[in-house]
Amino acid sequence: MTNNNNNNARRELNNGFGDSLSRAFELAVTPGVFAGAGYLVDRLLGTVAVFTITLMILAVIGELVLWWYRYDHKMSQLEAELVAKRSAVREGDERVIQSVGQVKAPAPIDMRLPTGVTLDDRFDLGDVR
């Protein structure tokens, strides 16, 4: 069971690295492609870097909006999974309990003082042996 958990953790880590690398490449290349297309339009129309800068800025804004929607979608998925697991554990669904591990409610905290101890007693350091 532990080996399977390690493999799953390693797989998730590698997927995270792959996703991050592809998104970084996308963020670097997409504005460059748009700027290149803008440069060609500028050359054809005889303008000075108007389309180059405009298309590059639009590409960066588009990438940031895309990142935001991807993030929002991923967080919605994770929240839905957590809510489903929580409700399944409360209902006692054995499949989820086995995948999550035995989930126990925390023991209530006993706030009572031990027998014979009161808050009015003074502690005398001379009695300590």
Image (spheres, grey):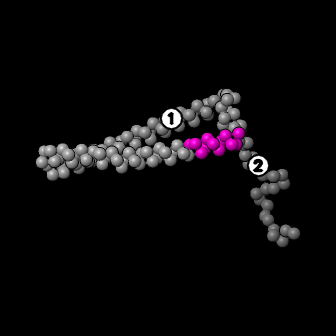
* Residue shown at 81% from the left, 56% from the top: 117
Would you name the residue on which mark 1 appears? Answer: 77
Task: Tell me the quarter of the picture where residue 86 sits.
Answer: top right
Would you name the residue on which mark 2 appears? Answer: 112
Q: Nearer the viewer, residue 11 or 108?
A: 11
* Residue shown at 75% from the left, 46% from the top: 110
- Is the residue under label 2 in contact with that under label 1 (CB below 8 Å)? no
Q: Is residue 122 above or below residue 107?
A: below
Identify the secondary structure beneath mark 2.
loop
Give the side of residue 60 with respect to residue 86, left or right. Answer: left
* Residue shown at 12% from the left, 48% from the top: 46
Q: Report the span colored magenta.
A: 1-12
Question: Percent x, y for residue 72?
Answer: 44, 39
Amino acid identity at mark 2? Arg
Spot the residue most to the bottom. Answer: 126
Q: Number of numbered discs present? A: 2
Give the side of residue 44 with respect to residue 115, left or right. Answer: left
Magenta segment includes 9: yes
Q: Main secondary structure of the magenta part?
A: helix
* Residue shown at 34% from the left, 47% from the top: 29
